[in-house]
Image (cartoon, helix red, strand yellow):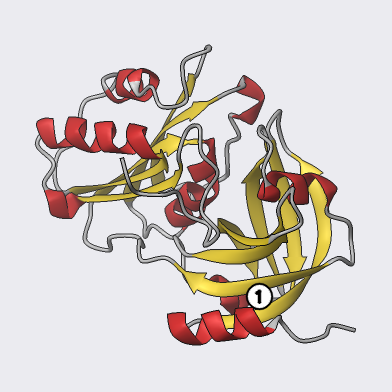
Amino acid sequence: MLSAPHDTSIELAKRLDARAELFQVVSSTPLGASLHQVVLSGDPTLAGVAGNDVMVRLLDAKGKHVRRRYSVRSVDHEVGQLTLWIVTGHEGAGARWAREASPGDQVDLVGPRGKITLDPLADWHLFLGDTSGLAAFYRMAESIETPGRAIFVVEVDDIDDALTAPFDEGLGVTGIFVERNGRAYDDPAGLLGGLAAFEMPAHEGHAYLFGEFHVMRALGIALADRGMQEEQLSHKAFWRAGRHNAEHGEPEKDL
């Protein structure tokens, strides 16, 4: 029997014009070398629309409560479940939770969160980032009306994390996975190389940049150099190399 969300979650949800709910873990399954799938049961409307995320209340290594934000990979309204893909190739509160979560565990969530959603006017969509962005990328691409085009350029630490997804046969899909090959996590060279590997399509496009703080900045500059305007770029740093995310779940923005 589920109890109520923590008082701090209820208060936070009110400030954010969101909702706080308790979910239960259905399963936690490794998908690749550093990627876990966590399925949760509860009110799936908390997941919002494609591109939105949820805030999860967790304990860090010191026993302090922190929040981590995770994009929703998929939603099943019929059975009342939502699915998260969580990067676990590091030591952090979220990674430990994903690896250790057991069926029946209660999870305190606040959502929906996030301001970046699919541009309905774009003819093509470029999804650019690292493994942490895969869940959002695939859910957003699945919401593209056909005919349309989705282009993925994603850097992975291990080729086992180069997960693909089925799409409507009317959607044109181009996928480029780039292996990190020992590059520093804040080195944009791999993704810049992947970006240079294709010609920008004709007509109006939109780019979604999700990943490491410094890399996302470099990619934004590169896309501007290739003629994309500011209104065609949506970018969000999910994490920052060498630093834990802040208590609210996002990386610090100071340089």
| Residue drawn at point x = 72 percent, y = 43 percent | 36
Q: Where is residue 184 in the image (x, y as percent from the top left)?
A: 46, 19
| Residue drawn at point x = 69 percent, y = 49 percent | 93
Relative horizontal placement of residue 129, taking residue 224 as reference (left or right): right
| Nearer the observer, 60 or 128 | 60
The kind of residue on which mark 1 rests is His
Above or below 43: residue 214: above
Q: Where is residue 209 in the image (x, y as percent from the top left)?
A: 34, 43
**Callout 1: helix, strand or loop?**
loop
Q: Is residue 17 in view? A: no
| Residue drawn at point x = 55 percent, y = 49 percent | 135
Q: Position of residue 128 (x, y in %)?
A: 37, 37
User: Label 1, on which residue?
Assistant: 77
Relative horizontal placement of residue 237, taking residue 112 as reference (left or right): left
| Nearer the observer, 229 or 109 | 109
| Residue drawn at point x = 65 percent, y = 72 percent | 109
| Nearer the observer, 94 or 169 | 94
Above or below 85: residue 90: above
